[in-house]
Amino acid sequence: MKTIHTLILTLFISTSIFAQKLDREKIKALKIAHITEQLNLTETEAQKFWPIYNANEDAESKLRENSTNRRKDMNVEELSESEAKSLLLAMEKVEKQKVELHSKMLNELLEILPAKKIIKMYQAERSFRQKMFEEYKKRHSKQ
């Protein structure tokens, strides 16, 4: 009986984790489709654009994950003043790294795309986030 319960619990957890990964992959695919549609990239532009864009997304994701992991189990009330200051400085460092990544991507994109398309990319990212936020609100307002 214990084996069956353990198996069911393992199956449930595995399914939950797999579903979350599928959701992230689905959202990533939707974002790529949205940006592609908005930018109207030529084949040559797309071949150069996506590796740069995806590398930047991956690097930003790692920064976010590291930052989140650092703060996840912290209780602000239990921090000493020096620990809190150290945390703030680490947070500032992460923000500077994000700006550096963003600047690097912008410079790389300027070599392959017209400035107008880069501005469209920023607009497409913003409109995609807005669509996702609206979808989230719609789904969670029904509960």
Image: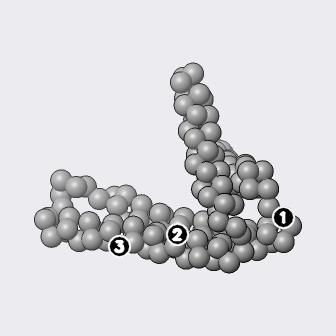
From what the image shows, is residue 34 above or below residue 141? below
Identify the residue shown where x is 63% and y is 77%: 108
Q: Position of residue 50 (x, y in %)?
A: 73, 68
The residue at which mark 2 appears reads as: 102
Question: Contact (CB < 8 A) between labels 1 and 3?
Answer: no
- Residue 123 position in % (x across, y down): 61, 51
Mark 3 or mark 2, earlier in chain: 3
SS at mark 3? Answer: helix
Q: Which mark is residue 42?
A: 1
Amino acid on which the number 3 mark rests in the picture: Lys
Q: Is residue 113 above or below residue 35?
A: below
Name which residue lies at 55% across and 76% down. 104
> Which structural element holds mark 1?
loop
Residue at 73%, 51% in the rendered image: 38
Instruction: Answer few, some or many: residues within 10 Å of disc 1's Cα (few below 14, many 20 plus, some between 14 and 19).
Output: few
Q: CA distance from mark 1 to mark 3?
A: 37 Å
Return the residue nearer the eye: 110 or 100: 110
Tell me the quarter of the picture where residue 21 sits.
Answer: bottom right
The N terminus lies in quadrant = top right
Residue 141 spot, x, y in % from top left: 53, 24
Disc number at residue 93? Answer: 3
Quarter of the figure with the C terminus: top right
Give the foreground label among 3 and 2.
Answer: 2
* Label 2: how many Cα within 10 Å (few below 14, some 14–19, many 20+): some
Residue 62 in sight here: no
Task: Please name the amino acid that badge 2 sits on.
Answer: His
Residue type at the position of mark 1:
Thr
Kindly indicate whether the residue at mark 2 contacts the one at mark 1 (C-beta within 8 angstroms). no
